Amino acid sequence: MTNSPVLIAGGGIGGLSLALTLHQIGVPCVVFEASREMKPLGVGINLQPNAIRELMEMGITEAELDQVGVPSREWALVGLNGKEVYSEPRGRFAGYNWPQYAVHRGDFHMLLYRKCMERLGPDSVQLGARITGYTNTNGGVAAHVEHLDGSKGDFQGRLLFGADGIHSVIRAQMHPDQPPIHWGGAVMWRGTVRAKPLRTESSFIGLGTHRHRMVIYPISQVDADGMALINWIAELTMDNADGWQHDGWFRPVEVEDFVHHFDAFRYDWLDVPEMLRNADCSYENPMIDRDPVDTWVDGSVALMGDAAHAMYPTGSNGASQAIIDARVIGAKMLKYGATSDALDAYNDQLCEPVSALILRNRGAGPFGLLNMLDERCGGTFENIDDVISADERQDFMAKYQAAAGFAKDQLNAAPSTIAINQTQEAVSAE
Ligand SMILES: Cc1cc2nc3c(=O)[nH]c(=O)nc-3n(C[C@H](O)[C@H](O)[C@H](O)COP(=O)(O)OP(=O)(O)OC[C@H]3O[C@@H](n4cnc5c(N)ncnc54)[C@H](O)[C@@H]3O)c2cc1C
C-alpha cells in the first residue's frame, strides 16, 4: 500500500492545486475528474494575496497569472446613491508582499490543468472518471470509480481527498446526516461584459445595499481600446421560505429576466441596466453554502475545497481557501508523511477556523458595512463620516481580514507554508 498513489476526487481548483503541491513534495497522486473534458467554465473569482503567495511558491509566475486575470488595486463599497462608503487598496498596493488577482475562473483553472499536464504527465488527471464512494481498508483506501462508458472499478490509494465541490459525494458518505444545501434567499445573476473599467481600472466595487447590490470588477488587462472583460454580479435577497424552486445551480438566463430589479442603479459614472444589457453571458446562481461539519477526516479520507467548506462568496475566499487547503495538506505530509496523521493535523489546523468563516460570511462578510449603513440611514447620506466614522469603517474591515486569514502583517511575516528548500529536490527534478 505504501507505494500506491494519493487519490484526489475532483479536478477543480482545489484538486489540481493539491496535485501540483503533492508533485512538488514528491508524493505520487492521481486526480479523478467526472467531466469528459476540461473546459474554461465560470466567470470571475478573486484570489487573495495569501493564495497568490502559495501559487507562486508552487512555481506559477505573475506573467502566467497576468494571462488569466489582473492584479487588483482597490476594494470599494458604494451606497445606493452612488457615493463612496469605503475604499482601500488591495494586494501589493496595500503593502502585501504578494498581489491580489481577479481572474477568469475558467482560464485560471485551465492554467492549473496545463501545469498538471506538463509536470505530472497526461495520465495524472483521469477525465470522465466519477468517484461514487470509498472504503477505508487496512492501511489505505479504495475509491469506487465509475467511467463514462458505464464501467466501474476500485482504485487503491494511500489516501483519498474529496475535492469534489459543493455537491461532494465523499462528504455525503462521510456525513450521511448532513442537512441539505443551505440557501439564505439571495440570488446572484452573474456574467461578463466588455466595457471600460471603472475607478482605478482594477477596482472591486460593491454597490447598493446588503440585500440588493451589484458587484463589478475587471478580470482582464485593459486592451488598446481601453476596454477590459468585466465580471458583474447582480444580487437580490428574497423570501426563501419555499426553498430554491428553479432547476440547476448555474443556469444560463436572459438579462431581461432580472434587469428590472436594477432599474434605479443609474449614476453619472455608471448605468447598470445598460451594462447588463450589453453582457456577453449571464447565469442564475443561488447563493448557497453548507452547514459546517465537525470533521473533514474519516480514516484515510479527507475533504478539501468546497467539499469541506462551501461558503458564500461575499468574502471572495472560496477558491483562495481551496488553494490554502492544498498547501497545508502538503506541509503536513512533509511532517508526517502521506499518512492519516497528516490528515488529522490538517483537520486540526483548518476545520474549526474555516467553519467559523463559513458562518461569518453568512452574516454578510465584509459587506456588513453596507448593512450598518442600511440600519443607520437607509443607504442615503451626504457625508459618510456622519453615518459611520472612518475609524469604525477601518476597524470593521481589519477585524474581517484578520478572521479571513489575510491580515497583511501576519501574512508578510509568516514563513512559507511549504519552505522552498524542502521542495528544491522535487522542483529541480522537473
Ligand atoms: C463549472 C464551475 C464553474 C464555477 N464558476 C464559478 C464562478 O463563476 N464564480 C465563483 O465564484 N465560483 C465558481 N465556481 C466555484 C469555485 O470554482 C469554487 O468555489 C472554488 O474554486 C473551490 O473549488 P473546488 O475545487 O473545491 O470545487 P469545484 O470548483 O466545484 O470543483 C470540483 C470538481 O470536482 C468535479 N467532481 C464533482 N463530483 C465529482 C465526483 N464524484 N468524482 C470526480 N469528480 C467530481 C467537478 O466536475 C469539478 O471539476 C465554479 C465551479 C465549477 C465546478
Image: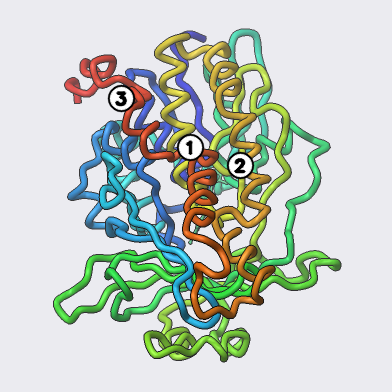
Q: Residue lying farthest left?
A: 224
Q: Which residue is mark 1?
A: 405
Q: Is residue 116 visible?
A: no
Other-residue count near label 2 (Cα within 10 Å), few / some / many at <14 / 14–19 / ≥20: many
Q: Which residue is mark 2?
A: 357
305 or 109: nearer the eye? 305
Q: Is mark 3 within 8 Å of ligand 1?
A: no
| Residue contact between numbered discs 3 and 2, judged by CB atoms under 8 Å | no
* Sequence-wise first label, 3 or 1: 3
| Residue contact between numbered discs 2 and 1, judged by CB atoms under 8 Å | yes
Please name which of the two marks, 3 or 1, marks the residue nearer to the observer. Answer: 1
* Residue at mark 3 to residue at mark 2: CA–CA distance: 29 Å
Q: Please report the residue visible at 79 percent of the width from the left and 40 percent of the height from the top.
A: 178
Q: Position of residue 99 (x, y in %)?
A: 28, 47
228 or 282: nearer the eye? 228
Q: Secondary structure at mark 3?
A: helix
Other-residue count near label 3 (Cα within 10 Å), few / some / many at <14 / 14–19 / ≥20: many
Other-residue count near label 1 (Cα within 10 Å), few / some / many at <14 / 14–19 / ≥20: some
**On the rendered image, what quadrant is the C terminus found in?**
top left
Q: Secondary structure at mark 1?
A: loop
The amino acid beneath tag 3 is Gln
Q: Position of residue 132 (x, y in %)?
A: 66, 38
Q: Which mark is residue 24?
A: 3
* Sequence-wise first label, 2 or 1: 2
Q: Secondary structure at mark 2?
A: helix
Query: In the rendered view, does 12 fall on the left or right side of 380?
Result: left
Please name which of the two marks, 3 or 2, marks the residue nearer to the observer. Answer: 2
